[in-house]
Image (spheres, grey):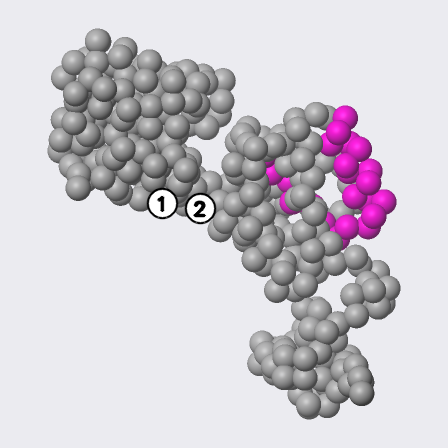
Amino acid sequence: MKRPAVRITDVAALAGVSAGTASKALNNTGQLSQETRARVQRAAAQLGFTPDARGRALSSGRTYTVALLTTDSSGRFSIPIMRGVEDVLSAGELATVLCDTRDDPLREQSYLRSLVARGVDGIVVTGRRTEPRPPIDVPLPVVYAMAASSDPSDASVLVDDAAGAAAAVTHLLELGRSRIAHITGPADHRSAIERAQAVAATTTLVGPPLFGEWSEQWGRQATDVVLRTHPAVDAISCGSDQIARGVCDRLRELGRDVPTEIAVTGYDDWPVMALASRPPLTSVDLRLEELGRRAAQLLLDAIAGRPHHGVLELPAVLIPRESTLGS
């Protein structure tokens, strides 16, 4: 015989609260104490209560769906951010929809019209670059992650790129390295510029930063330039893990030991690059999942009528490995 469905009134009775209070506790709404919410949640788990998503949406006027709008087609940055977003939203039983605009303004506008028509509860906007972007114009709560909105009153969550780059160079200085070169990405990318400026402000480099591409090939080419112009260099700071892996490969081909002769640091702490490098890279972790979690929490606050205004900047974390410490 099929067991009768557990109702919200059953959960309320077991928790010793009203049905309305039980509903608020399970939907993460209302002004309830943490103890009350926890008691209701324990009762729901004990009874195996499963909320009726359609009924909940109809009664609340919400769809319990949030969109992640991104320009990062490769998923390099958007996937870790989405994992962090889902860590927060899944606890409140909200679904996350990923929308890849592919850097196409027309595609972005098409997605936005569709998302508004579907009645999503809010939008997290992210991408693959850190330049401030124009705000999106929708009648929904919006939070920007990794790249700020150009409107300072919007809610944006960023990583402190400058402090991360400075931490990597400070690490090299503390290891006794004093003849440091810096190789980074395109000169028109905000992240490359900020990281290079922070490095130059932290120490006197052997020469001006070398700007190029976010690629292993550029790391190899730039290594030859550095060694030709500054043969006594004892450390190379890189603006990305891809560049740093190319640097390590080229140094190994030239018979230069890393880190005994030349220490190398990366940036991004991208496992596919940082851990596969020979040797594994000392790198700066952008903490993208934490960035996603903070963005999602700000979005939930905005949905609940408590919007955040302005920029929230999170610290990056240096992860030391063999490319500076040795085996």
The numbered dot on residue 317 is 1
20 w.r.t. 319: above or below = below
Total residue callouts: 2
Tell me which residue sits at (66%, 26%) in the image. Answer: 103
How far from the left and from the top, in percent, is residue 44?
A: 67, 80
Q: Position of residue 75 (x, y in %)?
A: 56, 37
Q: Amino acid at mark 1?
A: Val
Q: Residue at x 73, y 85 (%)?
A: 12
Where is mark 2, residue-wise? 287
Instruction: Please state if 153 lies on the left or on the right of 279 as rendered.
Output: right
Question: Dot 2 surroundings within 10 Å: few (below 14), some, or many (20 or more)?
Answer: some
Residue 306, given in percent of the width and then of the height, sits at 67, 57
> What is the quadrant of the C terminus in the image?
top left
Which quarter of the picture shows residue 127? Answer: top right
Is 15 included in the stretch rendered in magenta? no
- Lower sequence index among marks 1 and 2: 2
Residue span colored magenta: 106-127
Which element type, helix, strand or loop, lies under badge 1?
A: strand
Q: Are marks 1 and 2 in contact (CB under 8 Å)?
A: yes
Which amino acid type is shown beneath numbered disc 2? Arg
